[in-house]
């Protein structure tokens, strides 16, 4: 008998509460709007850029008389503060997402191993019992591959 990598359950009520927390979290950031793809990748900030922005905002607030009027210093500081908060939220959410993905991967393994055994047994049983053949035919769809032919382009 196989050992489950993850043996747990969550009640429907607890799951609903967790999902409500996620909805509440999402509502907390309702002011965020989706960006077009080209804008979303235009100015990603790595650690060097974050340091650069920190230094620029610090310089601008330390020496505001040298900042041109075309730059809204209040907005710049506000954007920087929000960026810092979003960065913290992204780190936290990334950790949560990683935990959820690991749980799904463990459960996938816990599910696939015994299901593959069931499928093998059903294939053998279908040779002796015609009633099982339709079940095996349905199960076998998992292993059918679709190949694109070059003539279908």
Image: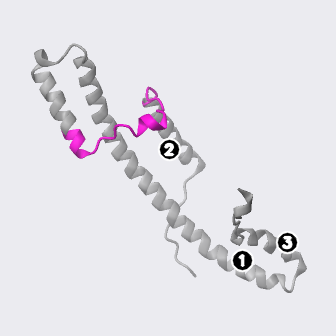
Label 2: few (<14), some (14–19) or many (≥20) C-alpha neighbours in 10 Å: few
Q: In the displayed image of the protein, which residue is found farthest to the top?
A: 69
Residue at image location 84% in from the left, 85% down from the top: 127
Camera-side residue: 53 or 151? 151
Magenta region, residue range: 29-51
Of the pair 50 and 66, the residue shown nearer to us: 66
Would you say the magenta stretch is mainly helix, strand or loop?
Answer: loop
What's the residue at 50%, 44% (across, down)?
18
- Whether the magenta-drawn stretch holds residue 82 is answered as no
Q: For marks 1 and 2, give the CA distance.
A: 35 Å
The location of residue 125, given as percent across then percent down, is: 80, 83
Gap between marks 2 and 3 measured at Cα: 39 Å
Discs 1, 3 touching: Cβ within 8 Å: no
Vertical comparison of 153 with 28: above or below: below
Instruction: Report the side of 120 relative to 101 (left or right).
Output: right
- Residue 122 spot, x, y in % from top left: 76, 79
Does 93 sit left or right of 126 as displayed? left
**Residue annotated with mark 3:** 134
Q: Residue 18 carries which label?
A: 2
Establish if 29 lies above or below 93. Answer: above
């Amino acid at each position: 008998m196989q050992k489950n990598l993850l043996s747990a359950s969550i009640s429907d009520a607890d799951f609903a509460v967790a999902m409500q927390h996620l909805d509440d979290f999402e509502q907390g950031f309702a002011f965020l709007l989706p960006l077009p793809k080209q804008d979303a990748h235009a100015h990603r900030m790595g650690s060097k850029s974050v340091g650069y922005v920190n230094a620029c905002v610090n310089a601008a607030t330390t020496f505001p008389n040298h900042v041109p009027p075309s730059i809204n210093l209040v907005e710049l500081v506000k954007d920087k503060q929000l960026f810092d908060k979003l960065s913290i939220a992204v780190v936290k959410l990334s950790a949560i997402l990683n935990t959820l993905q690991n749980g799904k991967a463990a459960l996938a393994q816990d599910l696939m191993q015994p299901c593959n055994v069931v499928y093998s047994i059903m294939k053998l049983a279908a040779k002796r019992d015609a009633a099982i053949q339709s079940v095996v035919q349905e199960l076998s769809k998992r292993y059918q591959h679709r190949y694109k032919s070059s003539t279908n382009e």
